[in-house]
Image (cartoon, rainbow, N blue to C red):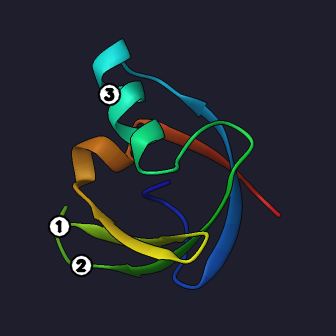
Amino acid sequence: MTKLKQNTKAKVTEISGGACLQGRLMSMGIYPGREIKKLSHFALRGPIAIKVGRSVLALGFGMARRITVEIQ
């Protein structure tokens, strides 16, 4: 997800992480099959703002890079 351009919609295909990470992301509404939109990207591995449903979230770079997406 870190390589997506700003204002791009994508579909989550995989979360490569442990049960703790998957549980945390699932509680935020991010899971395989869910559509997300990348809103902004801060410089040098900073947080990434995304929109999931009606919510806007900021994910750390390390967490965001473990989410594999497919551009729609």
The spot of residue 3 in percent (x, y) is: 49, 60
Could you tell me which residue is drawn at 59 percent across and 39 percent down?
A: 31
Contact check, label 2 and label 3, Cβ < 8 Å = no
Q: Label 2 belongs to which residue?
A: 42
Mark 1 is on which residue type? Gly
Q: What element carries label 1?
A: loop
Q: Which one is in front, 71 or 35?
A: 35
The spot of residue 32 in percent (x, y) is: 66, 36
In three-dimensional space, the C-alpha distance between marks 1 and 3, rounded to whole angstroms, equals 18 Å
In three-dimensional space, the C-alpha distance between marks 2 and 3, rounded to whole angstroms, equals 22 Å
Query: Does any portion of residue 57 appear in the rendered image?
Result: yes
Above or below residue 4? Residue 31 is above
* Snapshot quadrant of residue 57: bottom left
Mark 3 is on which residue type? Leu
Res 21 label: 3
Could you tell me which residue is drawn at 41 percent across and 42 percent down?
A: 27
Q: What element carries label 2?
A: loop
Query: Does any portion of residue 18 appear in the rendered image?
Result: no
